[in-house]
């Protein structure tokens, strides 16, 4: 499996779990997201964007990285351009969006979540991470997620959810109907590997592997 990490402009913390998740992956940076390369000790193989958020220090530091430069007035975000480069030019069959959450742009963060759902529906394995927090698309079918015991997780529905089952958590559900907008599935607590089943709808699992405040 060819895994690509897309370095995005949001928050990113270096953690042992993050480094393990990125092991063996290839890297593409989207504009100012290249600032995370030093944190991770990597050199991306490609750098894309309109470069409006990459200052001269970054431009000089990573001058050897091949660039694809786009105009500021374009139809896609720099992040989506980087994702498409990984998929169509480099043959990615798994994506990790690092730096996809937090930061100054809520619109970009929300767009990354929605785009991840769309990619997951097309069959692309994908998750998003800030190091401190992770996000996983939840679609109809079965899914397991290995989380540290006692860490927090929530499910945010993007539709009405039908047939939702959550196992190995403090507050399990079985064949549950979750209305769109409900907060019922906020702040659950993992008991290790969490198992999900969904009959219909779309959702995002938000996990905080280092947050034990729910204990």
Image: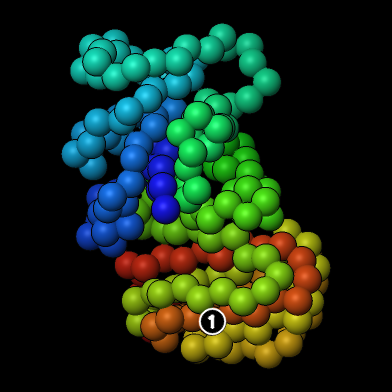
- Tell me if I can see residue 32 in this picture: no
Secondary structure beneath label 1: strand
Residue 83: percent from the left, percent from the top?
52, 35
User: In terms of image quadrants, where is residue 175?
Assistant: bottom right
Q: Residues within 10 Å of mark 1 (few under 14, many from 20)?
A: some
Q: Nearer the viewer, residue 2 or 147?
A: 2
Residue at 35% over, 82% down: 149
Looking at the image, residue 129 sits to the left or right of residue 39; the answer is right
Residue at 51% over, 76% down: 144
Looking at the image, residue 159 sits to the left or right of residue 113; the answer is right
Residue at 75% over, 81% down: 163
* 171 over 197 or under it: above or below: below
User: In terms of image quadrants, where is residue 111?
Assistant: top right
* 45 over 25 or under it: above or below: above
Residue 212: percent from the left, percent from the top?
35, 75
Residue 128: percent from the left, percent from the top?
47, 51
Tell me the quarter of the image containing the C terminus: bottom left
* 52 over 78 or under it: above or below: above
Mark 1 lies on residue? 195
Q: Nearer the viewer, residue 44 or 102?
A: 44
- Tell me if I can see residue 154 in this picture: yes
Looking at the image, residue 70 sits to the left or right of residue 8; the answer is right
């Amino acid at each position: 499996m060819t895994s690509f990490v897309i370095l995005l402009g949001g928050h990113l913390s270096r953690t042992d779990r993050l480094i393990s998740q990125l092991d063996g992956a290839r890297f593409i940076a989207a504009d100012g997201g290249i600032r995370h390369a030093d944190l991770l000790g990597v050199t991306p193989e490609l750098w894309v964007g309109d470069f409006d958020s990459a200052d001269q220090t970054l431009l000089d530091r990573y001058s050897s990285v091949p660039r694809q430069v786009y105009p500021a007035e374009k139809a896609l975000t720099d992040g989506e351009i980087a994702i498409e480069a990984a998929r169509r030019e480099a043959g990615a069959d798994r994506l990790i969006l690092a730096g996809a959450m937090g930061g100054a742009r809520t619109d970009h963060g929300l767009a990354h979540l929605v785009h991840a759902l769309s990619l997951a529906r097309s069959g692309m394995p994908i998750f998003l991470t800030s190091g401190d927090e992770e996000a996983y698309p939840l679609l109809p079918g079965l899914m397991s997620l290995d989380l540290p015991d006692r860490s927090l997780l929530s499910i945010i529905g993007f539709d009405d959810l039908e047939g939702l089952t959550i196992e190995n958590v403090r507050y399990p559900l079985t064949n549950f109907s979750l209305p769109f907008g409900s907060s019922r599935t906020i702040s659950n607590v993992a008991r290790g590997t969490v198992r999900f089943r969904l009959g219909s709808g779309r959702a995002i699992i938000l996990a905080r592997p280092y947050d034990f405040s729910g204990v």
